[in-house]
């Protein structure tokens, strides 16, 4: 049985502000919307010169010191803005209800899928010695994750148009993303995401290394061009 906690966390993009709710530290899913980005097609982050490893900018907040019962005003504002979402649910309906109670009314989705070589190594240990992207009669872990998350989040996506990207294959490595359609057409609902995924996988060569930077940069570009609307970028990866 697939343990989605091994594959999924949530990053929310809200007009350039990013927050994160994670079920584990091993993988991630992120959110965004369907808008044209022709003037920024496949916008990529700045990387170190060739031969050097890319190291994202690190930002550190100063350590918090307690002074009696008085928390800083900024801390109180954050506590009011963000609240913990429990993860002990028994059905998708409970998850959907919890998201609604947490204030999620509508969101625009972006999907990013990891096609790095580590999916073969992880699958050798956890998926009957097959790649996690193996296409067969039964759903592989990626198809299961897409189906379950799709059923949970699709009700919040008003236009049901989902820009989908892959990253980490031999054509993109850790530098770019590729659209699920050559003309950058969006998928119409998660059923089409699944269908297109199954069509693409046999023609892809897994590579690497793993970097979420290109898909996050693409999502940020889409958010900015939407005028700062609320987006959810869903990244599905093997966690390696």
Image (cartoon, grey):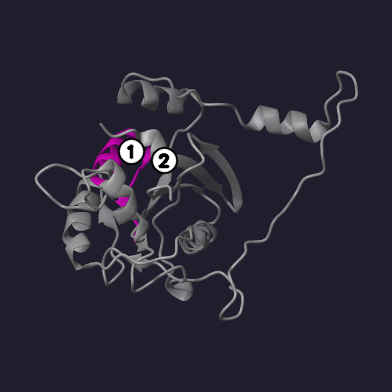
Question: Quarter of the image holding residue 180?
Answer: bottom left
Residue 139 position (above or below residue 162): above
**Mark 1 → mark 2, Cα distance in angstroms:** 9 Å
Q: Position of residue 206 (x, y in %)?
A: 30, 65
Q: Nearer the viewer, residue 124 or 106?
A: 124
Q: Which residue is mark 1?
A: 149
**Region in magenta:** 143-165
Q: Earlier in the sequence, mark 1 or mark 2?
A: 2
Residue 186 position (above or below residue 67): below
Residue at coordinates 55% horizontally, 53% vertically from top-left?
228
Query: Marks 2 and 1: in contact by CB < 8 Å?
Result: yes
User: Is residue 169 at least partly visible in the picture?
Assistant: yes
Q: Position of residue 78 (x, y in %)?
A: 70, 33
Question: Quarter of the image holding residue 67?
Answer: top right
Classed neighbour count for the residue bearing mark 2: other residues with Cα under 10 Å, few (<14), some (14–19), many (≥20): many
- Of all residues, the one furthest to the right in this rendering is 67
Question: Quarter of the image holding residue 208?
Answer: bottom left
**Does the segment drawn in magenta span residue 154?**
yes
User: Is residue 160 at least partly visible in the picture?
Assistant: no
Please tell me the numbered disc located at residue 8.
2
């Amino acid at each position: 049985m697939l343990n989605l906690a091994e594959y999924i966390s949530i990053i929310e993009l809200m007009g350039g502000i990013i927050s994160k709710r994670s079920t584990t530290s091993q993988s991630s899913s992120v959110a965004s919307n369907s808008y044209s980005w022709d003037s920024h097609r496949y916008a990529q982050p700045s990387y170190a010169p060739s031969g050097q490893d890319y190291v994202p900018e690190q930002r550190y907040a100063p350590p918090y010191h307690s002074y009696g019962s008085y928390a800083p005003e900024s801390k109180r504002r954050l506590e009011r803005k963000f609240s913990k979402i429990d993860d002990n649910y028994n059905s998708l309906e409970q998850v959907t209800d919890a998201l609604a109670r947490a204030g999620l009314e509508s969101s625009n989705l972006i999907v990013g899928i990891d096609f790095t070589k580590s999916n073969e190594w992880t699958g050798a240990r956890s998926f009957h010695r097959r790649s996690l992207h193996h296409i067969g009669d039964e759903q592989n872990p990626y198809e299961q994750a897409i189906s379950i998350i799709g059923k949970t989040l699709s009700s919040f996506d008003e236009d049901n148009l989902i820009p989908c990207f892959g990253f980490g294959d031999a054509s993109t490595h850790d530098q770019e993303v590729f659209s699920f359609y050559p003309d950058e057409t969006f998928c119409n609902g998660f059923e089409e995401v699944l269908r297109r995924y199954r069509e693409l996988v046999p023609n892809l060569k897994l590579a690497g290394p793993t970097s979420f930077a290109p898909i996050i940069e693409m999502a940020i570009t889409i958010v900015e061009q939407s005028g700062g609307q609320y987006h959810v970028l869903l990244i599905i990866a093997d966690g390696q």
